[in-house]
Image (cartoon, grey):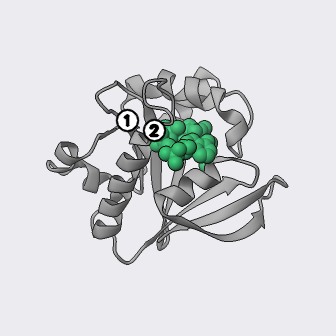
Amino acid sequence: MKSLRDTFLEPLAPLILDFRLIENSDNDLLRKWKNKNRQSFFYREIISSSEQRSWFIAYEVDPLSAMLIWTPDEGECGSIGLRRVANVIEVYNVMSWCEATRGTGKFLISVRGLLLLVSEYFPETSIQTSVLHQNQAVQWYQKLGFNKVELLTHESGQEFILMKFA
Ligand SMILES: CC(C)(COP(=O)(O)OP(=O)(O)OC[C@H]1O[C@@H](n2cnc3c(N)ncnc32)[C@H](O)[C@@H]1OP(=O)(O)O)[C@@H](O)C(=O)NCCC(=O)NCCS
């Protein structure tokens, strides 16, 4: 069984996808946009540089997790995280931040291609994501091919929608 990380390191993957695995030097970029978009996520606190570094150290040794930067022609324009939890691949940290691409549907097409590839590599797993109930991104995920599964309450008290990639 290939780990998620191995899958993305395969030589062919960078040729067909506008994504690359994050490196240490991406931490500032990720932190900046995660903090700007924090109302969209479960964790609402401002993330400090040292917290970001600690997260990266733990991420680096976790073979079941892959954090990717989206790199269309316009630049480094977004992120998406994939982590395997039992028989599920969870999608998280999804953000798109370039003016030139936002709302054009480009990110949606790239992410759909990525998830179709992931479902081909890992046919026995389901791909899921959890979206805060009030986040308009629910509709974006539906356009992408996710269906709503159920409305749940997070331990923090926030309501969220569990969605599954069909
Ligand atoms: C959700 C997000 C990733 C979408 O990125 P994007 O680059 O704007 O999206 P795309 O250009 O690929 O998609 C465009 C399509 O999705 C729709 N769309 C884009 N953002 C949307 C949003 N926030 N809510 C509803 N629909 C949205 C557009 O209307 C468009 O559809 P159309 O062609 O029918 O008009 C972006 O808004 C974002 O980073 N949001 C903040 C972080 C977030 O909420 N992440 C998800 C956490 S679970």
Q: Quadrant of residue 161?
A: bottom right
Q: Quadrant of ligand 1?
A: top right
Q: Quadrant of residue 45?
A: top right
Q: Which residue is mark 1?
A: 22
The image shows residue 86 at horizontal and vertical percentages of: 49, 71
The residue shown at (19%, 51%) is 10
Total number of numbered discs in the rendering: 2
The residue shown at (57%, 23%) is 32
Q: Marks 2 and 1, how far apart in space? A: 9 Å
Q: Quadrant of residue 67?
A: top left
Q: Secondary structure at mark 1?
A: loop
Labels 2 and 1: the sequence-earlier one: 1
- What is the residue that sits farthest to the front in this orientation? 104
Q: Amino acid at mark 2?
A: Ser
Of 101 and 10, nearer the camera is 101
Of 32 and 132, nearer the camera is 132
Does the CB distance between marks 2 and 1 fall below 8 Å? yes
Q: Is residue 162 above or below residue 38?
A: below
Check the picture and name the quadrant holding the N terminus. Answer: bottom left
The image shows residue 2 at horizontal and vertical percentages of: 27, 64
- Left/right placement of residue 4 relative to residue 54 reads left
The residue shown at (38%, 58%) is 115
Image mark for residue 79: 2
Q: Amino acid at mark 1?
A: Ile
- What is the residue that sits farthest to the bottom in this orientation? 124
Q: Is residue 94 visible?
A: no
The image shows residue 125 at horizontal and vertical percentages of: 42, 73
The residue shown at (27%, 50%) is 8
Question: CB at mark 2 closer than 8 A to ligand 1?
Answer: no
